[in-house]
Image (cartoon, grey):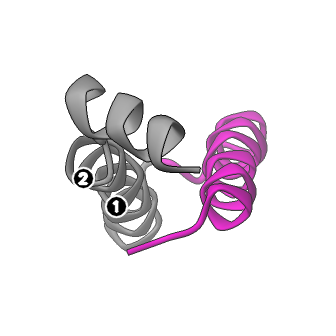
Amino acid sequence: MLTDKQSIILCAVVVLGFSVCGILGVLDNYAVSVTLLLLFLVVVVNLVFNKTPPDKEIKKERSK
């Protein structure tokens, strides 16, 4: 889905988005809230689906 670098960039965008919108007081706007929530869910789903089981990681290291 997303590479590690893309995940870090997306996490930074979500954190900065929540921070800036919270300071400016625009989190009451549903469009802003839904957008930030969807970005957050993309990060969480990416973490869940890209997690390689430990057995496969060990096999990959041994095959190198």
Near-viewer residue (22 or 51): 51
- Residue located at (50% from left, 48% from top): 27
Dot 1 lies on which element? helix
Near-viewer residue (16 or 1): 1
Magenta segment's dominant SS is helix
Crowding at mark 2 (Cα within 10 Å: few <14, some 14-19, many 20+) = few
Residue labelled with disc 2: 45
* Quarter where residue 15 is shown: top right
- Residue located at (64% from left, 55% from top): 4
* Quarter where residue 47 is shown: top left
Total numbered circles: 2
Range drawn in magenta: 1-27
- Residue located at (74% from left, 60% from top): 5
Q: Picture coordinates of residue 25 (x, y %)?
A: 64, 43
Q: Measure how far apart labels 1 and 2 are at the Cα level.
A: 5 Å
Crowding at mark 1 (Cα within 10 Å: few <14, some 14-19, many 20+) = some
Looking at the rendered structure, which numbered label has been put on residue 56? none
Near-viewer residue (7 or 62): 62
Image position of 12 (left or right of 54)? right
Q: Quadrant of the N terminus?
A: bottom left
Does the magenta run of residues contain 17?
yes
Q: Picture coordinates of residue 23 (x, y %)?
A: 77, 35
Q: Are marks 1 and 2 in contact (CB under 8 Å)?
A: yes
Q: Is residue 19 above or below residue 3?
A: above
Residue labelled with disc 1: 42
Dot 2 lies on which element? helix
Residue type at the position of mark 2: Val
Does the magenta run of residues contain 26?
yes
Q: Picture coordinates of residue 28 (x, y %)?
A: 42, 49
